[in-house]
C-alpha cells in the first residue's frame, strides 16, 4: 500500500514538472487540480471552447474568478499556457 501511495505521489509530481497545458487539458485533468472543482473546470472548458488562451492575462480575463492568487496556485501545480508558467509581472489584466 505504501508503495502505491509513493508511486502516485511521484507520478503527480512528474506531471506537475512536465506541465498541464490549460489549452489541451481534459476535464478529468482539470478536475484533478487540488483546490479546484467542477465549476472551475466548466468555466475553463467553456472559455477555451471559444478560442485557446493566448497567455495568463487572457486566461484571467476570460475565466471568471481567476486572479493572480489563483493563477499562482494553478502554476505551482504545473499548469501552463503556451508552455509558460504564471509570472505576475507579465500578466497585467484589464477587466474592461
Image (cartoon, rainbow, N blue to C red):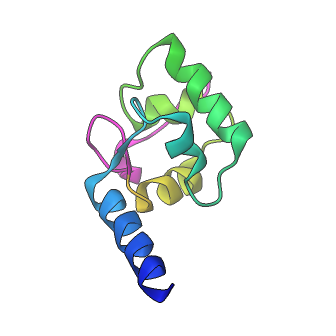
Residue 37 location (% of width, % of height): 70, 48
Taking 4 as reference, is 85 above or below it? above
Instruction: Please indicate whether residue 33 sits to the left or right of residue 77 in the image.
Output: right
Image point (60%, 46%), residue name: 31
**Magenta region includes residue 33:** no
Taking 54 as reference, is 51 above or below it? above
Identify the residue at the far right of this view.
Answer: 39
Magenta region, main secondary structure = loop
Taking 61 as reference, is 19 above or below it? below
Q: Quadrant of residue 94?
A: top right
Image point (51%, 84%), residue name: 1
Q: Tell which of 41 and 2 is nearer to you.
A: 2
Residue 50 location (% of width, % of height): 52, 11
Residue 48 location (% of width, % of height): 50, 22
Tell me the magenta residue range.
79-96
Q: Quadrant of residue 22?
A: top left
Amino acid at each position: 500500500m505504501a508503495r502505491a501511495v509513493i508511486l502516485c505521489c511521484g507520478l503527480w509530481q512528474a506531471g506537475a514538472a512536465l506541465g498541464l497545458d490549460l489549452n489541451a487539458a481534459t476535464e478529468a485533468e482539470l478536475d484533478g487540480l487540488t483546490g479546484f472543482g467542477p465549476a472551475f473546470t466548466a468555466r475553463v472548458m467553456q472559455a477555451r471552447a471559444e478560442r485557446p488562451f493566448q497567455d495568463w492575462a487572457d486566461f484571467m480575463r476570460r475565466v471568471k474568478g481567476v486572479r493572480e492568487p489563483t493563477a499562482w496556485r494553478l502554476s505551482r501545480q504545473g499548469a501552463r499556457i503556451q508552455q509558460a508558467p504564471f509570472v505576475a509581472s507579465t500578466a497585467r489584466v484589464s477587466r474592461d
